[in-house]
Image (spheres, rainbow, N blue to C red):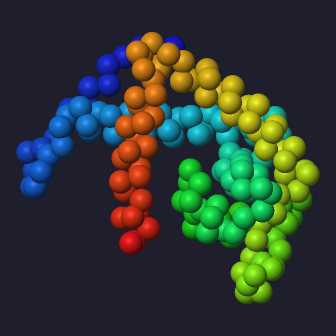
C-alpha cells in the first residue's frame, strides 16, 4: 500500500467564523475518505461473492445482538448508515427471506423485525468478508502504540453528538 502525506491545505481566506485546527481538518478528511473507501471495498467484495450489501449486515447484526428481534427505532441506534432508508430496506430484506416483519405484541400498531435462520447465516457469511477487509485495510493502524485511543476518542465524539443528531 502506498504511503503518502495527507496534509490538506486549509483555504480560510474567504471564511468567516472559527477555523478548526489543521490537524482536526486532516483527521476529518482522512476519517471520511477511509470510511467511504472501506465501505466501497466491502460492498464490491460482497457483490463479487453474491452476498447481500453491507448495510444489511448492520440490520441483521443489530437484531441478532438484541436477541433475534427488535423494533426499527432500536435498530436505528446501532446503524452505521442513515436510518431513513430502514423501512424500505427491511421490506427488501423480508422479501429476501432474511427477516420477518411482525406486529409487536405490546403495541398492535408497532412492528418488530425478527431475524430468520437464513438471515443469521447471511450475517455470518457477510462478516467473513467484512472482517477480512477490515483486518487488511486497517493494518496501518497496527503501528500505533494504542489503537484503542482512536476508537475511544471517536466514540466520545459520536456520543457527544447523539442528542444533537436526534434533535433532542
Q: Nearer the viewer, residue 42 or 66?
A: 66
- Which residue corresponds to the image point at 40% horizontal and 29% vertical from the top-left? 149
- Measured as percent of width and height from the top left, residue 163 is found at 39, 64
Q: How many marks?
A: 0
**How far from the left and from the top, in percent, is residue 43?**
67, 40
Residue 96 visible from this viewpoint: no
- Please identify the quarter of the rendering in which residue 155 is found: top left
Image check: 36 left or right of 145? right
Q: Please, is residue 34 above or below residue 76 in the view?
A: above
**Residue 85 sits in quarter:** bottom right
Q: Nearer the viewer, residue 44 or 100?
A: 100
Q: Which image quarter: residue 145?
A: top left
Left or right relative to 29: residue 127: right
**Residue 64 percent coordinates (x, y):** 76, 52
How far from the left and from the top, in percent, is residue 136? 61, 20
Residue at 80% across, 80% down = 105
Which residue is located at x 72 percent, y 50 percent? 65
Amino acid at each position: 500500500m502506498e504511503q503518502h502525506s495527507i496534509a490538506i491545505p486549509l483555504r480560510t481566506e474567504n471564511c468567516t467564523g472559527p477555523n478548526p485546527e489543521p490537524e482536526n481538518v486532516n483527521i476529518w478528511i482522512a476519517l471520511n475518505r477511509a470510511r467511504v473507501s472501506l465501505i466501497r471495498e466491502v460492498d464490491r467484495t460482497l457483490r463479487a461473492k453474491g452476498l447481500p450489501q453491507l448495510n444489511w449486515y448492520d440490520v441483521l447484526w443489530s437484531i441478532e445482538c438484541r436477541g433475534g428481534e427488535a423494533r426499527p427505532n432500536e435498530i436505528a441506534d446501532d446503524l452505521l448508515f442513515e436510518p431513513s432508508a430502514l423501512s424500505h430496506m427491511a421490506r427488501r430484506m423480508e422479501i429476501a427471506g432474511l427477516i420477518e416483519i411482525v406486529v409487536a405484541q405490546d403495541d398492535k400498531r408497532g412492528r418488530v423485525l425478527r431475524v430468520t435462520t437464513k438471515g443469521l447465516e447471511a450475517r455470518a457469511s457477510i462478516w467473513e468478508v467484512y472482517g477480512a477487509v477490515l483486518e487488511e485495510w486497517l493494518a496501518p493502524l497496527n503501528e500505533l502504540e494504542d489503537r484503542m485511543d482512536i476508537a475511544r476518542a471517536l466514540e466520545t465524539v459520536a456520543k457527544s453528538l447523539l442528542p444533537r443528531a436526534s434533535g433532542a
